Image (cartoon, grey):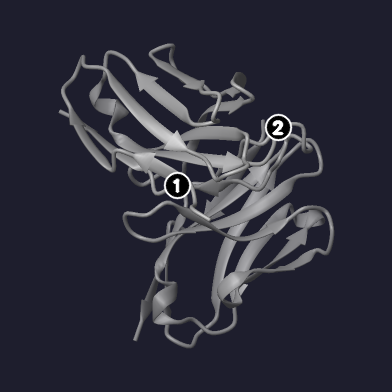
Amino acid sequence: DAGVTQSPTHLIKTRGQHVTLRCSPISGHKSVSWYQQVLGQGPQFIFQYYEKEERGRGNFPDRFSARQFPNYSSELNVNALLLGDSALYLCASSSSQSSYEQYFGPGTRLTVT
Amino acid sequence: AQSVTQLGSHVSVSEGALVLLRCNYSSSVPPYLFWYVQYPNQGLQLLLKYTSAATLVKGINGFEAEFKKSETSFHLTKPSAHMSDAAEYFCAVNPWGGSQGNLIFGKGTKLSVKP
Protein backbone atom coordinates (compact mmCIF):
# COMPACT_ATOMS: atom_id res chain seq x y z
CA ASP A 1 0.00 0.00 0.00
CA ALA A 2 1.17 3.52 -0.74
CA GLY A 3 2.07 5.67 2.21
CA VAL A 4 1.18 9.30 2.72
CA THR A 5 1.99 11.33 -0.37
CA GLN A 6 2.55 15.07 -0.59
CA SER A 7 2.99 17.47 -3.47
CA PRO A 8 4.91 19.36 -4.52
CA THR A 9 8.23 18.23 -3.06
CA HIS A 10 9.79 21.66 -3.16
CA LEU A 11 8.36 25.10 -3.71
CA ILE A 12 9.84 28.59 -3.90
CA LYS A 13 7.55 31.57 -3.41
CA THR A 14 7.92 35.30 -2.93
CA ARG A 15 6.75 37.24 0.11
CA GLY A 16 3.08 38.16 -0.15
CA GLN A 17 2.19 35.28 -2.46
CA HIS A 18 -0.22 32.45 -1.76
CA VAL A 19 0.65 28.74 -1.68
CA THR A 20 -1.34 25.50 -1.73
CA LEU A 21 0.13 22.24 -0.51
CA ARG A 22 -1.51 18.87 -1.08
CA CYS A 23 -1.64 15.61 0.82
CA SER A 24 -3.12 12.18 0.14
CA PRO A 25 -3.51 9.95 3.21
CA ILE A 26 -2.96 6.24 3.45
CA SER A 27 -5.86 4.35 1.92
CA GLY A 28 -8.56 3.87 4.55
CA HIS A 29 -7.31 6.68 6.79
CA LYS A 30 -9.88 9.37 7.42
CA SER A 31 -7.87 11.85 9.46
CA VAL A 32 -5.22 14.22 8.15
CA SER A 33 -3.03 16.49 10.26
CA TRP A 34 -0.65 19.21 9.13
CA TYR A 35 2.59 20.18 10.86
CA GLN A 36 5.16 22.90 10.22
CA GLN A 37 8.81 22.08 10.84
CA VAL A 38 11.13 25.06 10.84
CA LEU A 39 14.81 24.26 10.35
CA GLY A 40 16.34 23.03 13.58
CA GLN A 41 13.02 22.59 15.38
CA GLY A 42 10.51 19.85 15.96
CA PRO A 43 7.24 19.78 14.01
CA GLN A 44 4.46 22.06 15.24
CA PHE A 45 0.81 21.13 14.87
CA ILE A 46 -1.22 23.32 12.52
CA PHE A 47 -4.52 21.53 11.78
CA GLN A 48 -6.32 18.23 12.09
CA TYR A 49 -9.18 17.32 9.77
CA TYR A 50 -11.47 14.36 10.13
CA GLU A 51 -14.45 13.56 7.96
CA LYS A 52 -13.96 16.90 6.17
CA GLU A 53 -14.31 18.92 9.36
CA GLU A 54 -11.65 20.79 11.30
CA ARG A 55 -11.12 18.94 14.57
CA GLY A 56 -8.11 20.76 15.93
CA ARG A 57 -6.08 23.87 15.31
CA GLY A 58 -2.66 24.89 16.57
CA ASN A 59 -1.39 28.36 17.34
CA PHE A 60 -1.10 29.66 13.80
CA PRO A 61 -2.48 32.89 12.26
CA ASP A 62 -5.58 33.02 10.09
CA ARG A 63 -3.34 33.19 7.01
CA PHE A 64 -3.20 29.42 7.38
CA SER A 65 -6.25 27.44 6.31
CA ALA A 66 -6.98 23.92 5.19
CA ARG A 67 -9.69 21.67 3.95
CA GLN A 68 -10.36 18.01 3.44
CA PHE A 69 -12.08 16.51 0.44
CA PRO A 70 -14.58 13.60 0.20
CA ASN A 71 -11.73 11.25 -0.75
CA TYR A 72 -9.96 12.35 2.50
CA SER A 73 -7.14 14.13 0.70
CA SER A 74 -6.32 17.55 2.05
CA GLU A 75 -4.98 20.95 1.08
CA LEU A 76 -3.10 23.44 3.23
CA ASN A 77 -3.29 27.05 2.10
CA VAL A 78 -1.10 29.87 3.27
CA ASN A 79 -1.85 33.47 2.26
CA ALA A 80 0.36 36.54 2.34
CA LEU A 81 3.52 34.54 2.74
CA LEU A 82 6.21 35.76 5.12
CA LEU A 83 9.87 34.84 5.21
CA GLY A 84 9.17 33.04 8.47
CA ASP A 85 6.82 30.64 6.69
CA SER A 86 9.83 28.95 5.12
CA ALA A 87 9.72 25.42 6.50
CA LEU A 88 9.08 21.77 5.83
CA TYR A 89 5.34 21.15 5.87
CA LEU A 90 4.45 17.64 6.95
CA CYS A 91 1.19 15.85 6.49
CA ALA A 92 0.25 12.91 8.69
CA SER A 93 -2.65 10.53 8.36
CA SER A 94 -4.33 8.35 10.92
CA SER A 95 -7.28 6.03 10.89
CA SER A 96 -9.56 8.12 13.09
CA GLN A 97 -9.81 11.47 14.86
CA SER A 98 -8.49 10.13 18.13
CA SER A 99 -5.95 7.75 16.71
CA TYR A 100 -2.60 8.66 18.16
CA GLU A 101 -0.60 6.60 15.66
CA GLN A 102 0.18 9.02 12.89
CA TYR A 103 1.98 8.22 9.67
CA PHE A 104 3.94 11.03 8.08
CA GLY A 105 4.55 11.91 4.47
CA PRO A 106 7.89 13.10 3.11
CA GLY A 107 6.90 16.74 3.39
CA THR A 108 6.90 19.80 1.15
CA ARG A 109 9.88 22.11 1.50
CA LEU A 110 8.63 25.71 1.15
CA THR A 111 11.13 28.52 0.68
CA VAL A 112 9.88 32.10 0.82
CA THR A 113 12.20 34.74 -0.64
CA ALA B 1 0.91 23.22 29.59
CA GLN B 2 1.90 20.03 27.94
CA SER B 3 5.44 19.93 26.61
CA VAL B 4 8.36 17.75 25.65
CA THR B 5 11.99 18.45 26.48
CA GLN B 6 14.82 16.67 24.76
CA LEU B 7 18.12 17.09 26.56
CA GLY B 8 20.98 17.60 24.17
CA SER B 9 20.45 18.91 20.67
CA HIS B 10 23.40 16.87 19.43
CA VAL B 11 24.72 13.53 20.65
CA SER B 12 27.80 11.82 19.22
CA VAL B 13 28.70 8.17 19.84
CA SER B 14 31.15 5.70 18.40
CA GLU B 15 29.93 2.78 16.33
CA GLY B 16 29.10 -0.08 18.68
CA ALA B 17 28.60 2.19 21.69
CA LEU B 18 25.41 2.64 23.69
CA VAL B 19 22.95 5.20 22.39
CA LEU B 20 20.97 7.17 25.00
CA LEU B 21 18.67 10.00 23.93
CA ARG B 22 16.80 11.75 26.70
CA CYS B 23 13.19 12.90 26.73
CA ASN B 24 11.11 14.39 29.52
CA TYR B 25 7.48 15.32 29.19
CA SER B 26 4.78 17.16 31.04
CA SER B 27 1.17 16.12 30.76
CA SER B 28 -1.89 16.57 32.91
CA VAL B 29 -3.30 13.19 31.88
CA PRO B 30 -1.65 9.82 31.31
CA PRO B 31 0.20 10.43 28.07
CA TYR B 32 0.86 8.50 24.97
CA LEU B 33 4.54 8.85 24.06
CA PHE B 34 6.41 8.35 20.81
CA TRP B 35 9.86 8.42 19.29
CA TYR B 36 10.23 9.30 15.63
CA VAL B 37 13.34 9.30 13.45
CA GLN B 38 13.98 11.68 10.58
CA TYR B 39 16.66 11.10 7.98
CA PRO B 40 17.90 14.06 5.92
CA ASN B 41 15.29 15.45 3.54
CA GLN B 42 12.69 12.91 4.61
CA GLY B 43 9.55 12.77 6.71
CA LEU B 44 9.19 11.18 10.12
CA GLN B 45 9.23 7.45 10.74
CA LEU B 46 7.72 5.99 13.91
CA LEU B 47 10.33 4.11 15.96
CA LEU B 48 8.18 3.08 18.91
CA LYS B 49 5.23 4.13 21.04
CA TYR B 50 4.04 3.88 24.64
CA THR B 51 0.29 3.61 25.11
CA SER B 52 -0.12 2.67 28.78
CA ALA B 53 0.72 -0.99 28.41
CA ALA B 54 4.22 -2.31 29.17
CA THR B 55 6.56 0.40 30.43
CA LEU B 56 9.49 -1.00 28.43
CA VAL B 57 8.71 -0.56 24.79
CA LYS B 58 10.64 -2.18 21.95
CA GLY B 59 10.72 -0.56 18.54
CA ILE B 60 12.27 -1.02 15.17
CA ASN B 61 15.99 -1.17 14.40
CA GLY B 62 16.90 -2.39 17.89
CA PHE B 63 15.69 0.70 19.74
CA GLU B 64 13.76 0.61 22.98
CA ALA B 65 12.44 3.13 25.48
CA GLU B 66 11.29 2.96 29.08
CA PHE B 67 8.38 4.97 30.46
CA LYS B 68 9.12 6.21 33.98
CA LYS B 69 6.13 8.02 35.42
CA SER B 70 7.94 9.12 38.58
CA GLU B 71 10.62 10.81 36.49
CA THR B 72 8.25 11.89 33.67
CA SER B 73 10.80 10.46 31.28
CA PHE B 74 10.80 8.34 28.15
CA HIS B 75 14.45 7.92 27.20
CA LEU B 76 15.43 6.11 24.00
CA THR B 77 18.26 3.57 24.03
CA LYS B 78 20.06 1.19 21.72
CA PRO B 79 22.79 -1.12 23.02
CA SER B 80 25.08 -0.82 20.00
CA ALA B 81 25.08 2.09 17.57
CA HIS B 82 25.34 1.53 13.85
CA MET B 83 26.42 4.04 11.24
CA SER B 84 22.92 3.89 9.74
CA ASP B 85 21.47 5.22 13.02
CA ALA B 86 22.82 8.69 12.25
CA ALA B 87 19.71 10.85 11.98
CA GLU B 88 17.55 13.25 13.96
CA TYR B 89 15.32 11.82 16.65
CA PHE B 90 12.15 13.42 17.96
CA CYS B 91 10.25 12.60 21.10
CA ALA B 92 6.54 13.40 20.99
CA VAL B 93 3.58 13.26 23.35
CA ASN B 94 -0.13 12.98 22.81
CA PRO B 95 -1.39 14.52 26.04
CA TRP B 96 -5.07 14.41 25.20
CA GLY B 97 -5.84 11.01 26.68
CA GLY B 98 -6.84 9.67 23.31
CA SER B 99 -9.52 12.27 22.55
CA GLN B 100 -7.44 13.97 19.85
CA GLY B 101 -4.68 12.73 17.62
CA ASN B 102 -2.28 15.65 17.29
CA LEU B 103 1.19 15.42 18.78
CA ILE B 104 3.49 17.80 20.62
CA PHE B 105 7.11 17.35 19.60
CA GLY B 106 10.41 18.09 21.25
CA LYS B 107 13.07 20.07 19.41
CA GLY B 108 14.95 16.98 18.37
CA THR B 109 18.33 15.40 19.01
CA LYS B 110 20.74 14.89 16.16
CA LEU B 111 22.65 11.64 16.54
CA SER B 112 26.08 11.32 14.96
CA VAL B 113 27.86 7.97 14.81
CA LYS B 114 31.64 7.91 14.47
CA PRO B 115 33.38 4.95 12.84
Residue A58, above or below B44: above
Q: Quadrant of the N terminus of chain B?
A: top right
User: Looking at the image, is B78 positioned above or below residue B75?
Assistant: below
Q: Position of residue A65 (x, y in %)?
A: 44, 17
Residue A58 drawn at (x, y percent): 54, 24
Residue at (49, 20) in percent of width and height: A67
Q: Quadrant of residue B48?
A: bottom right
In the picture, residue B14 is in which quadrant?
bottom left
**Residue A105 numbered tag:** 1
Query: Which residue lies under the disc numbered 2?
Result: B100
Amino acid type assigned to the residue bearing label 2 in the image: Gln
Measuring from the top left, give residue B12's x and y in whole percent. 41, 72
Numbered disc 1: what chain?
A
As drawn, is B76 to the left or to the right of A107?
A: right
Q: Amino acid at mark 1?
A: Gly
Q: Secondary structure at mark 2?
A: loop
- In which image quadrant can residue A57 be found? top right
Residue that appears at 69% across and 36% down: A96
User: In whole angstroms, how far apart are the C-alphas of marks 1 and 2?
Assistant: 20 Å
Say whether residue A9 is left or right of residue B52: left
Q: Which mark is residue A68?
A: none
